[in-house]
Each structure stands twice: as C-alpha cells, then as structure tokens.
Image (cartoon, rainbow, N blue to C red):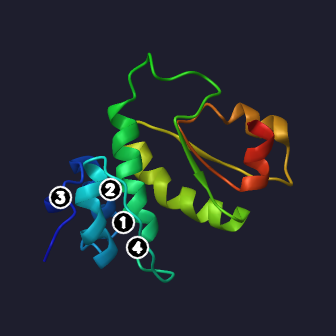
Amino acid sequence: MTTFAALGTPKELADTLTAQGIVEPFPIQVKTLPDTLAGRDVLGRGRTGSGKTIAFAIPLVARLAEREAKHFRKPGRPMGLVLAPTRELATQINATIEPMAKAMGLTTTVIYGGISQARQEKALRPVSTSSSPARAAWRT
C-alpha cells in the first residue's frame, strides 16, 4: 500500500488526512502527487469521488505553507485562488482544503455571489480562496 507520506506529502498534511480516515491515496493522487509536490504541472481527469480535490489541494497547501513568510503575505491579497463553477462546489472544495490549511497555519474562505460583498472582502485576509468565477471577476 502506498501512503501519502511515501508520495512526499508533508507530515502535517498526511496526519490531517489520516485523522479524517483518509489513509490510502486514490490512483490519481498516486500518479500526480510526486510531480505536483515537486512543482511540476499536471493535467488530470476523473469521475466524481476519484480524489481530484485532494490531489490538487495537497500541493497547493504545501506550497503556500512554504511561502508563508511575512514578506509574501499582504492583507486583502490571497496567495491562492481556486475557481469553481458553482458556489456549492466552491464550498465543497474549501471543506477539503480548510483542515489541511489549518494544520499548516493557513486560513481559507469561500467567495461567491448572493451574500454581502463587504463581509467577503473582509474575509480576503486568508491565504487560499475558493470562488465562483462570477464573484472572482469583481475582485480583479
């Protein structure tokens, strides 16, 4: 059995996944994590439930945690952005990323339309943001 640690996943992230009952990587994670954790780009496709979100969340959080020096961080300017086509998917992605981010001392938020823009602007202090494209457009 391949483990997340054997694939190069930082200990804090592997421990967080284990605490959630996720101990064995899915095939897409086995195939992509060594490359993505090394900073290389990959393209992966898979059905719902195939492990795609964790496959991109681990390197995202690991890389942001490496760069979390104070001189990189600026209030109101997230260091990571994940675009999702719907608010529901943005919320699901954030639910996957958030525990891993917390384990690395990072915070996340979700941005989407239909609720107070002012509240969401205040929430942009986090390092990684999941957003629907329409709401992200007003920010750029």
Structural distance between the alpha carbons of marks 2 and 1: 6 Å
Is residue 54 visible to the viewer in this orientation of the structure?
Answer: yes
From the viewer's perspective, is 84 left or right of 28?
Answer: right
Structural distance between the alpha carbons of marks 3 and 4: 16 Å
Local secondary structure at mark 3 = helix
Q: Is residue 103 above or below residue 17?
A: above
Q: Quadrant of the C terminus?
A: top right
What residue would you read off at disc 3?
5
Structural distance between the alpha carbons of marks 2 and 4: 16 Å
- Residue at image position (42%, 56%) is 57
| Residue 50 x, y percent position in the rendering | 42, 79
Front: mark 3 or 2: 3
Q: Which residue is outermost to the top?
A: 71
Front: mark 1 or 3: 3
Local secondary structure at mark 1 = loop
Q: Are marks 2 and 1 in contact (CB under 8 Å)?
A: yes
> Type of residue at label 4?
Gly
Structural distance between the alpha carbons of marks 3 and 2: 12 Å
Is residue 104 visible to the viewer in this orientation of the structure?
Answer: no
Mark 4 crowd level (few <14, some 14–19, many ≥20, 10 Å Cα): some
Q: Which mark is residue 20?
A: 1
Q: Which mark is residue 61?
A: none
From the viewer's perspective, is 99 left or right of 114?
Answer: left
> Type of residue at label 1?
Gln
> Type of residue at label 2?
Thr
Structural distance between the alpha carbons of marks 1 and 4: 14 Å
Local secondary structure at mark 2 = helix
What residue would you read off at disc 2?
16
